Amino acid sequence: MPRQKAIWLMLLVFLVGGAWLLYSGHQPEQLGFDPHAEIDPNCQYQIQLWDYRFPGPGYMEFFQSAVAHFEAQWPNVKVAVRFLPFGEGERILAESLQTSNPPDIYGTPDAWQSSIAAVSQQLLPAWPYFAAEERAGYHLASWFPSPEASAQPICWPRWLGLRAWLANQTILQTAGIDTSVLVNEGWDWESALQVLAMLKASNIPVTILNDGEEVFCDILAALAIPAKIDHPDASFHVRMRLRLAAHWLAGLRDQGLLRLEGQNNEKALVCYKNGRTAILAGAGPWLAAHCCHAEGWPATILLPPPHPRGGRPVARVEASAYFVFHGPGRDDGHLRVCAELARHLSRAASDWAASQKALLPAWCPEPAGLTWTLTGPALWQGPADKSLPQEMVRDFWLGKIAARDLEAGLCSPEKLNPS
């Protein structure tokens, strides 16, 4: 699956880049460019910026204002913006890289999936432009692959999109459920069973979106399942956590507490909008933004996925960021302007992101009081780098295979026993 490969390619880039940084000490002759180059006030800089029209309310007004503010600060800089269509942007970027004519700056919805940008030799690494104290001003979850990683940044983060479960607040409160506790403290597996059973008794279902893979990933993230599971030193412990997740979810499935509507989300969304569904499980940040802000939709709250007893609420995030590229005719002064624009837009996004219920600003010197633990993509690979078997997960939710079959299909048989 491209998404898993992107994660491992980016990890390699970060590790190699970190070693390079320690060796180079930011020396221009070793970096190949001067991150402290002077910006010539007599030179007219033309910057090509590619981005997307994000659906959150007020985005275009914020974006245009941020670009205009930068141009006012730098009168000799003009920014030409191109908005890419969702679903095609990565292909368009790949074509530009193949012809060695990429944009100066590319704003990606999810940096962890932008494998094309992350491994390109035309990528301008961000770390030489970052001071240590500046990096500390960004949310820890902005940096791949984890807050503990020592690798250096290759891009400028702008916000974190929460992958949360969407809940109709009115329905939950009518059923006697304390929504403030669920939002702030999360819910463990035992509490989730009680809540879902209360909703089922009211004949208001909880619906799984898409093919159910994201819901499974949500639960694995709460169990700290690593991105790759077929390594010998962790296989036994990972197997036990996979077993817990599969059997717990199978119990919800068999009791009718979670149901799959199919790969087409339209029916599920119509039911949710009309108050016939209490919770949508497995939603991404932009669907969450739509449900929270669009007119005519019920009052929506974001819930972290259920976690095991004794654990903490954990939510996966998508980290939106800016990549900068070098190319023919782009001297060190031009690259410095691009880095300054990426930094400006990265920080400027904070106020807008903070106004969106499904987003968190990446630049947050004074972090908001979110009590959830945030983590990157909870994806994994099986034997011989085989990607997550989506068809198997879908069949699991449809009741065609048992929990033990899903568990076995995700592990390498020769590594199941502890050493």
Image: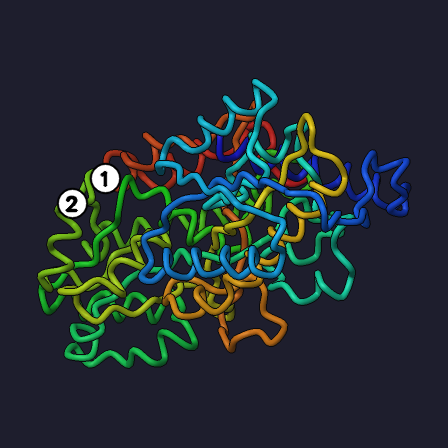
- Residue at point 35%, 67% (across, down): 303
Which element carries disc 2, helix, strand or loop?
A: helix
Q: To which quarter of the image does residue 84 belong?
A: top left
Query: Which one is nearer the viewer's eye here, 86 or 360?
Result: 86
Way the structure is coloured: rainbow
Q: Is residue 252 left or right of residue 159?
A: left
Q: Amino acid at mark 2?
A: Glu
For the point 25% across and 68% down, the residue is: 300
Mark pair 2, 1: CA separation: 22 Å
Q: Is residue 318 left or right of residue 203?
A: right
Judge by depth and name the residue closer to the eye, 78 or 106: 78
Residue 217, image x and y in percent?
Answer: 43, 47
User: Closest to the observer: 33 or 39?
Assistant: 39
Q: Which residue is mark 1?
A: 399
In x, y percent, where is residue 164? 37, 59
Label 1 crowd (10 A; few <14 / some 14-19 / many >=20) = few
- Kindly identify the amino acid type of the residue bearing the numbered disc 1: Gly
Question: Which residue is located at x 50 percent, y 38 percent?
Answer: 113
In the image, is 413 to the left or to the right of 187? Answer: right
Quarter-of-image position of residue 16: top right
Mark 2 / mark 1, whichever is N-terminal: 2
Question: Element type at marker 1?
Answer: loop
Kindly indicate whether the residue at mark 1 contacts the one at mark 2 (C-beta within 8 angstroms).
Answer: no
Which mark identifies residue 55?
A: none
Percent x, y of residue 238: 56, 45
Foreground of the two, 362 or 201: 362
Residue at the disc numbered 2: 266
Q: Is residue 147 above or below residue 322?
A: below
x and y percentages locating residue 385 in the rendered image: 55, 26
Q: Quadrant of the C terminus?
A: top right
